[in-house]
Amino acid sequence: MSVPRSRRFAHAACMSVIALLYVLSVPWYRDSDAPLRLWLGLPDWVAVALLCYVGVAFVNAIAWILTDVHDDLPDDVADGVSDDVADALNVAAGDAGERR
């Protein structure tokens, strides 16, 4: 199953934006003798870092929305699961004693 090209591009763009936000969150651009300014009651470099981290969380959520996650095991893998592993999975799922 292939992922549409537009989704791959959007996912790559999200990852690029996340990387950019991480770079912007580090106050490397700030002069050491720059006067302290307050934004949102915090020093400006702290406010910028926190806003970047909130942006990272938001863009990361969008990237996960664009990602297809398949929880089903392929048939060839499921057939290779031993009875002991299947029993352990059934116990973990609360279906002890029932076979699939």
Image: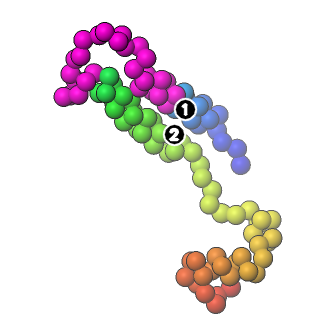
Q: CA distance from mark 2 to mark 1?
A: 8 Å
Judge whether residue 50 is colored magenta: no
**Residue 6 visible from this viewpoint:** no
Residue type at mark 2 is: Ala
Q: Nearer the viewer, residue 58 or 35?
A: 35
Query: Residue 90 occupies which quadrant of the picture?
Result: bottom right
Against 84, residue 47 (above or below) is above
- Magenta-tinted stretch: 18-44
Q: Is residue 34 left or right of residue 1?
A: left
Nearest the camera: 54 or 27?
27
Query: In which quadrant of the rendered view does residue 72 lie?
Result: bottom right
Most foreground residue, 89 or 12: 89
Within-10-Å neighbours for mark 2: few <14, some 14–19, many 20+: some
- Circle on res. 57: none
Q: Is residue 33 above or below residue 4?
A: above
> Within 10 Å of the Cα at label 1, are there few (<14), some (14-19), or many (20+) other Cα atoms?
some
> Is 17 placed above or below 7 here?
above
Q: Which residue is mark 1?
A: 15
Q: With 77 as the anchor, is 43 left or right in this view?
A: left
The quadrant in which residue 71 appears is bottom right
Q: Which residue sits furthest bottom?
A: 97
Q: Going 45% across and 43% down the picture, which residue do you hit?
A: 61
Mark closer to the observer (2, 1): 1
Picture residue at 36% right of the left edge, 10% below the top: 31
Q: Position of residue 64 (x, y in %)?
A: 51, 44
Asked whether the residues under the numbered discs 2 and 1 touch, taking CB atoms below 8 Å apart as contact, a structural biologist would say: yes
Disc assigned to residue 63: 2
Decide if residue 80 is on the left or right side of residue 41: right
Q: Is residue 19 visible?
A: yes
**Lower position in the chain sequence, tag 2 or tag 1:** 1
